[in-house]
Each structure stands twice: as C-alpha cells, then as structure tokens.
Image: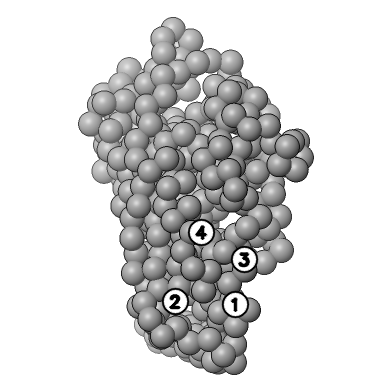
Amino acid sequence: MKKLLVSLLVLSLLMTGTLFAAAEQETAEAGWKPSKTITMIVPWGAGGASDQTGRIVAAGMEPILGAKIAVVNQPGASGATGQKSAFDADHDGYTWAANADASVATYQVQDLTPDISHRDWNAYFAIFTPCVITVNPDSDITDWDSLMAAFKSRRVKVASAGIGAGGHIAAETFASQMDVTYNHVPYGGGNPAVVATVAGETEVVMQLSMEVADMLRAGRLRAIAVLDSVPLKITGVDEIPAITDFASGFPSVGFNFGLFIPKDIPADAQEAISAAFTAASQTDKVREFAELKGSVAVSIQGEEADAIMEQAASMFGWLMYEGGVASVNPETLGIDRP
C-alpha cells in the first residue's frame, strides 16, 4: 500500500510538472512576458469567495507568468467599484478583477456600471459554488418547517455580501419561490455577512458554500438546505439536504468564480494569460481546496465562459429587475428573458 501511495504521489507530481511545463511553453510562444507586477482587484472584502478564488488562482499563475500578482481588495457598491477600477485601468493585461458571474452580469441592469457590459470581459472560471441557507445556531430555526414558519410570521433579517451578490440573489430567489418577504441586511462582502450571522446581528445568511464551510465545521452556523437539486457534502459536516427535498422545482442557485479581464487587451497577453490560467486552475491544490469548501473545481474560459455569462445576465438580471432590485430593463441591453 505504501509503495502504491508513493507511486501515485510521484505520478501526480509528474503530471503537474508536465502541465506547468506545457503552460510555460505556451506563454513563451505567446510572446508576452510581464515586465512588471500584475494587479488583481478583488471588489469585495477579504475572505469571501471572490477573494479566496482569486488568491489561489493567482498563486498558481505567478510562477508560470514569471511575475508577481498583487491582490488588492476594493469593496464598494456590491463589487461594482472595484470592477470598474479594473476596467478603467489601461487594457494592457496588467490589471485584472476577481469576481463572480452573476455579479458582473448584473452590474449594468443595476445601473452601477452603465457603460460597461458583461460582454466587455473575458471570464476565466476556476470554482463553482452553490448557495446554502444557514442560520445562527442559537436561532429557533432548526429545520425547513421552522425556517418557513419564521419567514411566514415575521421579517427575518437575512445578511448578504451586498445588493446583487450571490447571497442576495439566493435570498431574492427564495423569497420569490416561497412567496415570503424578508429584511435584507447588506455587508461589504461574503465573509462579513457570514460573521454577522455568527455574531447574531442577523439570523439567516444564504451565502456560498465556500464562505460558510468553516463556520459549519466549527458549529457556529447551522445548515438548513443547499439551493440545489442534490445534497451537498462538505468535509467534516453532515450532509446538507437539497432544497428540492422540501420545495419541488426550486431552481438551483450557484455561481462561478474566477478572473475577469477586458476583452481588448493585446492578443499576446491574452494567449499567455489563458495558458497560465488553464494550468493553474487544474492543479490538485485547487481541486482539494474546492472539495474542502463544498465546491467544484472547474476550468472554463472562452466561448463556454461567454455562454455562462449570458445565462447569468438573463436569469439573474431579469430576476432582479422584476423584483424591483435593478432599475434598468434588461431588454434594453439586449438580454433575453430566461
């Protein structure tokens, strides 16, 4: 058995080494080698899903590109402030953003970035993570029935990373599907929203599995359901039931996280970044991180990523507009109804 484990470890290292060598060769052939530090703007507070994903991907890309990637947290306006800063910088490949599909896809309908469309970005997705309904363990909400009783009898305080963030979209979907109202309490990122619920400032948070996993393991949050059609397994946590076990037909609510870079950067920079991302997003380190956080490691870019962004704009843009959260009619932006 020991020999087998050693052999598997050696094989894994060889495969990783081969992957990185190929990526380094591709970046060299692209003809773009960074001559200065790359800035990655995370438009949310530290510790959230965008921040965690951005940092682990950046760490994998640095040795391939041969450049330092400086991570800067710039929260504000539900992530639109930092996202706009990344777009307003020179489109030379040296300024990136780390964010989620739904956030970037809905900034325009929220009138937060009127002149910047989700179609102006190349997206590079590394992690997919579903939303989970969790509560403060001291709450009288202990299961689905008590959750619904609470929402039917009072305006439950629900924390989120901000208007248009994943947890807010999850809460809006929940309210729409279950015909309830709630008291939305926005924070400057997923981690502050989770901490607020742990501290008892709010009673419920529907943020991402990546953001609640540690608190669930520590017993500082209680899980009620994952907003998906299959149960969620997180290392060290009892299996979390699917929301469809209680509400048949409830749509899955989950988001893709990764990098966003303006589409019109130089072609050689785009090629080099693409190759580096492919290698960095497919490492064991990213896969193990995703598993620990109850998420799924993916490696998506190009046309597939564009299609995901269009779907997010359609699904969540219209949800927010019809729910009165977004002010701009998606139809005026060429966004089809889901």
Q: Which label is found at residue 217?
A: none
Please state which of the two labelled residues, at mark 2 or mark 4, is closer to the viewer: 4
Could you tell whether 75 is left or right of 147 in the image?
A: left
Q: CA distance from mark 2 to mark 3?
A: 19 Å
**Which amino acid, by three-letter code, is at mark 4?**
Phe
Give the foreground label among 2 and 3: 3
Q: Mark 1 or mark 4: name the one nearer the start of the chain.
A: 4
Q: Residue furthest top?
A: 153
Q: Is residue 245 left or right of residue 239?
A: right
Indicate the amino acid at tag 2: Met
Residue marked by disc 3: 263
Foreground tag (1 vs 2): 1
Which is more N-terminal, label 3 or label 2? 2
Please say whether residue 57 is visible from this viewpoint: no
* Quadrant in which the N terminus is drawn: bottom left
Mark 4 and mark 3 in contact (Cβ < 8 Å)? no
Cα separation, mark 1 vs mark 4, equals: 14 Å
Q: Is residue 63 left or right of residue 274?
A: left
* Quadrant of the frame with the C terminus: top right
Decide which of 92, 37 is in the foreground and name it: 92
- What's the amino acid at mark 3? Lys
Residue receiving disc 2: 61
What's the residue at 34%, 40% (across, down)? 188
Residue 274 vs residue 131, the one in the foreground: 274
